[in-house]
Amino acid sequence: MKYTNITLLLILPALLFSQAPSAQEIIKRVDKNILSDSKIVVSKMIIHGRRGQRTVEAKSWQRNIDQSFTEYLAPAREKGTKMLKLGDKLWTYSPATDRIILISGHMLRQSVMGSDLSYEDMMEDPFLQNMYEAKIAGSDTVSDRPVWILDLKAKIKEIAYDARKIWVDQERFIILKENLYAKSGTLLKQITLGEVMQVEGRWIPKTALYKDALKEGTGTELIIDSISFNENIPDTIFSKASLRK
Amino acid sequence: MIKFLLKGLMRDRSRSLFPVLTVFIGVFLAVFFYSFMNGVLEDMVRSTAHYQTGHLRIMTQAYAKEANQNPNDLAFIGVAKLLDVLNEKYPELIWTPRIKFGGLLDIPDEEGETKTQGPVSGMALDLFSSSSVEVRLLKVKEAIMRGRMPKEAGEILIADEFAKKLQVSPGDTATLISSTMYGSMAMTNYKIAGTVQFGVSAMDRGTIFADISDIQVALDMPDTAGEILGFFPDDIYHEKQAPMVAAAFNQEFKDSDNPFSPQMGTLPEESGLTDYLGLIDSMSIIIIVIFVLAMSIVLWNAGLMGSLRRYGEIGVRMAIGEARGHIYKTLILESVSIGIFGSVLGTLAGVAVSYLMQMYGLNFGFLFKNSALMISSVYRAQVTVGSFVIGFAPGIISTVLGTAIAGIGIYKRQTSQLFKELEV
């Protein structure tokens, strides 16, 4: 009996590990959770700056992974500002100047509306399996939820973050915490999920805190007010003409 | 006796020409280098004051910590009130607010879409008021290459080199894409009124200049400025008065617990030029010492050669009873005459060349292509009272020192050997 217990104790971790999905399977499930033909999101960003906070509201239309159109709704200074992403190009329109400007080069690294998110963040392919090789680094608990910890290393060259460490909910396959690193190993950003919600069978973040590790301040809260998947979005939305409408 | 010695010197060129030439060259170089270094260092201080720090600079404590990044989110709010206080408390200085900013300048095509664009650094200052100290100090009107000064809101000046790169001319429209002080994207259309060239590579590469009221609107900075600069009316940094003003201001307004309270710094503190300013003070001494040493060695050698050549003459003078001390004294007097003559010639030539260099300057722009230093790429000398005086010290001291060392040999000659020597 004694020997049986010891043997069980020795083989238990191996048994558990054999039941856990592989790293690639985990990120595939994470991607599947957010994958949709299209979605419409109404969100707000609460930006905590060094001189107080302000709230920016926006509505986004997204199709596949490479088409997105965002219109800012508030505050008054930003109202009517629009952004269009088509493939690897990003344009912005400001009603004050009636100009459509291509955001490129070092501008892509700039902050979006003073938040802790950059234009590069908006431009990135959201699907981890397209960009990273993954390996399981361990398991832990985040917000009382059991998680797998995965180390991701970029498998393509042109990428904003060379490495990521993600904490994935073992049941819901949603990333609860994420650290983003530069090639040098420097921590660039931290994303921590607050509330999560289930919409059309998917677990998605309701609130998240983005923190640029290189900036002072307490970060930017992203709050999703509403989200709907697989909506029929007209083609005209994803055109430069819609920026001036 | 001096007249006798001078006649001797003029008749015997070998005794005067080489030493005079040596003194001339040495003094010329000393005067020129002194004036050149004076000009370069003075110019560096002046450029730094005009383009960067003023003679005194006020920023919030938080802004000051990251001043090189122009963190406008930490700028000082309440500029009008503070300017009133400054003008009342320190009327001996001229106070003027500035905003420095960065971003992208985008040039539209006929359809309003991007034709060209480039990263830009900007300086917002008082361009519109008729009594603007900024326009006078920065010589903005003189820097205009094409077009004219901005006259109304929405007009900017752009560096000429940058304008050529972006293929824009006066009258064209450019859109500035930057960030408001709260971090939002700021896009503003401007009309290019003119192009400018300041001779400062860091600015001529990619800078725009706008009136501060325009930029306060564009960057959502009402009654706000990144910095308030103070200038002494004579445009000279007063090293005793400035720290006193700064100390008095900080005593009254700086609050260590409030990162947004203002703090004042002096030009050396703000620019890190403390060591350079110290160098200006000790420069004349350094130059004199170097040239005295170098020329003394050359003239000592010349004196030795002269003594050898005049071996017979000195022997005869000793043989007919002239005292060694008297011979030594006459040689020293000769060297003083040569020193004065060579110094006058060298000073005149040095001042003349320095003056030409002051007028026209030398363009070292190719050395500053990628420089971020706010210093002029045209180097100019500066002729001062010191330029007329500085050459005389090395000119006279070195000839006397050289002759004095070479003349020691006179005391070593034995009178008993003289006739034997003279027979040879």
Image (cartoon, grey):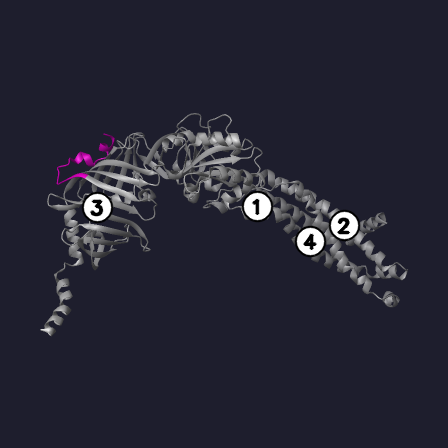
Where is mark 3, residue-wise? A194
Separation of marks 2 and 4 at Cα, in angstroms: 15 Å
Which amino acid type is marked by label 4? Val
Q: Secondary structure at mark 2?
A: helix
Q: Secondary structure at mark 1?
A: helix
Question: Which of the two discs, 2 and 4, sits closer to the camera?
Answer: 4
Mark 3 residue crowding within 10 angstroms, few (<14) / some (14–19) / many (20+)? some
Answer with mark 2 or mark 4, whichever residue precedes in sequence: 4
Indicate left or right for A219 with A1 as reference. right
Separation of marks 4 and 3 at Cα, in angstroms: 77 Å
Which amino acid type is marked by label 3? Gly
Question: Which of the two discs, 1 and 3, sits closer to the camera?
Answer: 3
Q: Secondary structure at mark 3?
A: loop
- Circles 2 and 3, Cβ within 8 Å, touching? The answer is no
Question: Which of the two discs, 2 and 1, sits closer to the camera?
Answer: 1
Asked if marks 2 and 4 fall on the same chain, the answer is: yes
Instruction: Report the disc number at residue B292.
Output: 4
- Per the image, is A234 magenta? yes
Q: Secondary structure at mark 4?
A: helix
Q: Which residues are magenta?
A: A225-245
Q: Quadrant of the N terminus of chain A?
A: bottom left
Question: On what subunit does the disc labeled 3 rest?
Answer: A
